Amino acid sequence: MNSIFIVIPVLIFLMFCIGLELKLSNFKLILKQPLSIIIGSLAQLVLHPLIAWIILSFVDIPNEFKIGIIIIASCPGGASSNAFSFLAKGDVALSVVLTSLTSILSIFTIPIIVSSYIYFEIGDTLTFHLPFFKLLIQNVIFLLVPIIIGMVLNKHSESFVKKISFLTKKLPIYLLLILITVFFIENRKVIIDNFSELSLLVLILVVLVMITSDLISRALRIKLEQRKTIIIGVGIKNAAQAILIATSPFILYNPKIGIPAVLYALIMNIVVLTYVGLNIKRKKTK
């Protein structure tokens, strides 16, 4: 089974679910918490790829993996960050807005960041050519359109949205697991051969961006609830989007580039769950 036939419907459904949780009134939060929104968005879309870029300048790994790490680092927050924020007693409303806002902004930021990395660090060759406008169009179709459809449905049929909420809240996680499993089976030899090196690299990246986000948020005196949400949001990434960019026949069409996203999807959940667990434990001891 080719993972491309799974990643497209999974990504569309994930974005649709984000839209279902979103109302235009949610964006009033931008006026109420502008600093948290700005820091959270910059952490996900600028700080994360910047730290990844710096780390990659010190390691010697195949170019496919370098591009893959930059892609996943440039992706917006994943839908599961909302659930993790809830468990950690973070600001769920902020998490919903950040996930939605970064998903929309990433339509434009991902092509810029990834094409810049390829041009300056690797060389925009035929082997690693990123078709900027094709990626832009693909992002609009698979990210923006499903979010808008979800928002429209939420506005005009709230009762139906409530009825299917048990599916839209749990199904995305299982679909992502299926996607990762299929991709892993398809590319198991390459993944196993590079597992230890890439896993360590991804682990360092996840931990470093979460710590850096925490330090910046503390320095700017962002409240604890919002700080937790920013930290979780920067750790959790939309792995399905990264895999689609890597494997799409219209973009890079190179499954090897998608391998870092698969490993990131596994490691991010372990790290963020650990962070959530520590917060819950700290809450109980107080």
Image (cartoon, rainbow, N blue to C red):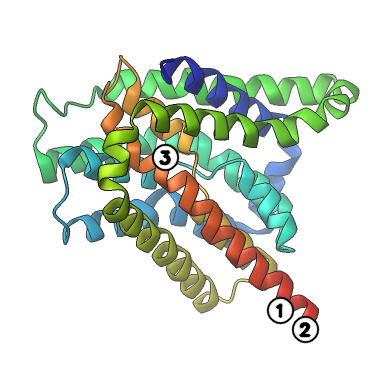
- C-alpha gap between disc 3 and disc 2: 35 Å
- Asked if the residue at tag 2 contacts the one at tag 1, i.e. Cβ–Cβ closer than 8 Å, the answer is yes
In the structure shown, which secondary structural element does the residue marked by tag 2 occupy? helix
Image location (x, y in percent) of residue 279: 68, 71
Image location (x, y in percent) of residue 51: 31, 59
Residue 285: assigned label: 2
Which residue matches tag 1?
A: 282
The nearer-to-camera label among 1 and 3 is 3
Q: Residue at x 31, y 45 (%)?
A: 69
Quadrant position of the N terminus in the picture: top left
Question: Relative to 36, is 197 on the left or the right?
Answer: left
- Asked if the residue at tag 3 contacts the one at tag 1, i.e. Cβ–Cβ closer than 8 Å, the answer is no
Residue kind at label 3, given as amino acid type: Val
Residue kind at label 1, given as amino acid type: Arg
| Camera-nearest residue between 212 and 10 | 10
Mark earlier in primary sequence (1, 3): 3
Q: Quadrant of residue 97?
A: top right
Q: Quadrant of residue 171?
A: top right
Image location (x, y in percent) of residue 83: 70, 49
Which residue matches tag 3?
A: 262
